[in-house]
């Protein structure tokens, strides 16, 4: 269990570093291409449909790659221990009266 959490943390950190490098590269590239002294006539980018589709799909894929291992780690934590006795308690507050219903069920 602990090894799985450790591996998940490393996987998330890898995605974080990749995103940081990609965003930094895009920021530096945008600053370089739109700097007035270096490039007085900037490149004109019109209707980047492909880049818009990629910018939509890649974050969802990254979230799926992070979510699947985390679900595999979370589900065993909430494993229900089956007890043969179920104790039900329901409380009904109606105006000033309080009714208490208690029922014990034996499961076989």
Image (spheres, rainbow, N blue to C red):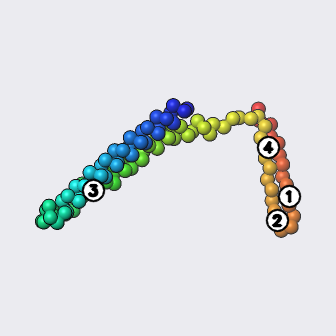
From the image, state whether disc 2 or disc 3 is nearer to you. 3
**Residue 39 rendering spot, x and y as whole percentages:** 13, 62
- The residues tagged by marks 2 and 3 sit, at their Cα atoms, a distance apart of 63 Å
- The residues tagged by marks 1 and 4 sit, at their Cα atoms, a distance apart of 17 Å
The label number, if any, that marks residue 99 in the structure image: 1
**Pointer 3 residue:** 27
| Mark before the other along the chain sequence, 1 or 2 | 2
**Pointer 4 residue:** 87
**Residue 86 rendering spot, x and y as whole percentages:** 77, 41
In which quarter of the view is residue 35 placed?
A: bottom left
| Mark before the other along the chain sequence, 1 or 4 | 4
Helix, strand or loop at mark 4: strand
Q: Quadrant of the C terminus?
A: top right
Helix, strand or loop at mark 3: helix
Q: Is residue 44 visible?
A: no
Nearer to me, 21 or 55:
21
Taking the image as shown, residue 26 lies to the left or right of residue 33, namely right
Helix, strand or loop at mark 1: strand
Instruction: For label 2, count other residues whose C-alpha is less than 10 Å away and answer few (under 14), some (14-19) or many (20+).
Output: few
**CB atoms of marks 1 and 2 within 8 Å:** yes
- The residues tagged by marks 3 and 4 sit, at their Cα atoms, a distance apart of 60 Å
- In percent of the image, x 14 and y 61: which residue is there? 38
From the image, state whether disc 3 or disc 1 is nearer to you. 3
- The residues tagged by marks 3 and 1 sit, at their Cα atoms, a distance apart of 65 Å
**Pointer 2 residue:** 94
**CB atoms of marks 3 and 1 within 8 Å:** no
- In percent of the image, x 56 and y 40: which residue is there? 74
Furthest residue in direction front, as rendered: 37
Q: Quadrant of the N terminus?
A: top right
């Amino acid at each position: 269990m602990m090894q799985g959490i450790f591996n998940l943390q490393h996987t998330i950190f890898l995605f974080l570093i990749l995103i940081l490098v990609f965003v930094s590269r895009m920021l530096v590239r945008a600053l370089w291409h739109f700097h007035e002294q270096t490039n007085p006539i900037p490149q004109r980018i019109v209707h980047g449909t492909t880049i818009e589709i990629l910018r939509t799909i890649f974050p969802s894929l990254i979230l799926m790659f992070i979510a699947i291992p985390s679900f595999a780690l979370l589900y065993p934590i909430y494993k229900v221990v089956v007890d043969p006795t179920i104790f039900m308690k329901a409380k009904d507050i109606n105006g000033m009266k309080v009714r208490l219903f208690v029922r014990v069920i034996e499961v076989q």
